[in-house]
Amino acid sequence: MNGVRVLVGTKKGAFILTSDGKRQKWDVSGPHFGGWEMYHLKASPADPNRIYASQSTGWFGQLLQRSNDGGKTWEPVGNKFVYDGEPGTHTWYDGTPHPWEFKRVWHLEPSLNDPDVVYAGVEDAALFRTTDGGQSWHELPGLRNHGTGSKWQPGAGGLCLHTILLDPIQRDRMFIAISAAGAFRTDDGGKSWQAINQGLRSEYIPDPTAEVGHCVHRIAMHRSKPDVLFMQKHWDVMRTDNAGASWREVSGNLPSDFGFVIDVHAHEPETIYVVPIKSDSEHYPPDGKLRVYRSRTGGDEWEALTTGLPQSDCYVNVLRDAMAIDSLDECGVYFGTTGGQVYGSADAGDTWAPIVRDLPAVLSVEVQTLR
Amino acid sequence: MIKVVLPAHLQNLARVGAEVEVRVAGPVTQRTVLDALEAAYPMLSGTIRDHTTLRRRPFVRFFACEEDLSNLSIDAALPEAVATGKEPLLIIGAIAGG
């Protein structure tokens, strides 16, 4: 029987929401790891029972958890993240050199075909990989050392590598994004990297079209068209049709082009979703209305999706890893808010309903389609 | 045996009660006690002190015999009452944040 499993990371624990293919009735389990910040949970596409979770606190640091039974039980795995070689420096907020210091794992991206291989995006920004199911982690230093690393500067949330996209066709190709450095691509499995930020324009940095320094919040891909990427930048929604060689703005008629999340419909590669946020100084929806915007044209033309979402007095945020889309025939869309609601739509965004309303602030949402 | 009291989050992580006992051969210091603790409960590695530098995490404190031992050298001898197992070494999460 078809079903879905939504993995929710919050400021105070993880929650697992499960439903059948109708996605009307939900079971909620959790909190798992109550009291800990759960930045991200993600399951292996190669083994749906294998789930990895990033667990941390300011007191006790970073832990990684692994489940082999779909989240029923967990075991801690390796949590040693050491930069390769002499770490060197990046640029601090005030422009001075600052040593690289590991703080936490923001994002976990399991391999498409091997449940023991996982990539981890960390703060201060670097890419790590495990090939033994999380027991040991090793940096792919080519990214941090590719030439611009010393210029990378943290955004308000830290110098974080928060997005990892694995190309399902060219298996050695991978895209990552860093706040506030930009987007990067490797074509050789992570040995060498290039910045792919041409076409981005960021008025808040000294050179608005610099090679690096852009605060990319999220990038998304449809697996059938991996050369087409969609980006929610700090300000501006962007797309590339050539794997990042150049970007163009597709913000169109959005009420605000600031935001964090962006994602792609499971079956329509030109249908994309964002949640506009009023501004970088306010971090809540325009006019107190929580609206998902959908474009069926790959950007530029957007429609507001409001049915079932609060349309007054709503001042939550939707963080960058907090939207996910299942791949059932009529695809489901899910997002979580800093107010602790997880909303779901079983009809590709036309109508919405809260799955849960009162969780801690949601940091991340992922969904597994179970067949 | 050396008695060590863990904060609640680390009890849950190690799946133990508030107090555990570890065996230390030789001098009883922060380093040797934590070495023994991490050997017995590997999941605690990195949660109390840094993996590489062995420096205490900033929001973790060590107390014993009504003394704050947090800033002692990691190789300084712990109080006799800890070394003989009469008093526990208390590992405390600092009261900070919300």
Image: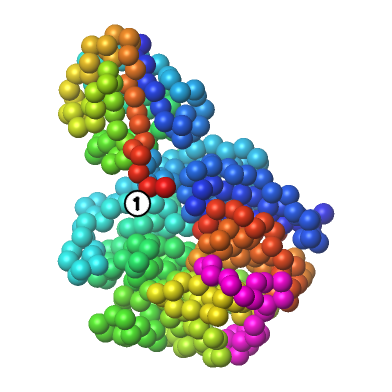
Q: Is residue A167 visible?
A: no
A359 horizontally vs A138: left or right:
right
For residue A105: magenta?
no
Query: With respect to residue B41, does A263 lie above or below?
Result: below
Residue B95 in the figure: left or right of residue A206 = right
- Could you tell me what secondary structure mostly forms the magenta stretch? loop
**Among the 4 quarters of the image, the one containing residue A327:** bottom right
* A284, A19: nearer the viewer: A284
**Residue at image location 34% in from the left, 24% down from the top:** B90
Chain letter of disc 1 in the image: A
Dot 1: element? loop
Where is residue A356 shown, x and y percent of the image?
Answer: 67, 56
Residue type at mark 1 is Lys
Relative to A95, say whether A246 is above or below.
below
Q: Residue at x 29, y 8 (%)?
A: B84
Report whether A66 appears left or right of B97: right
Front-most of residues A139 and A14: A14
* Above or below for A269 versus B2: below
Residues rendered magenta in the picture: A295-317
Identify the image quadrant of the C terminus of chain A. Answer: bottom right
Please indicate whether residue B65 sits to the left or right of residue A186 in the image.
Answer: left
Kindly identify which residue carries mark 1: A103
Q: Is residue B60 visible?
A: yes
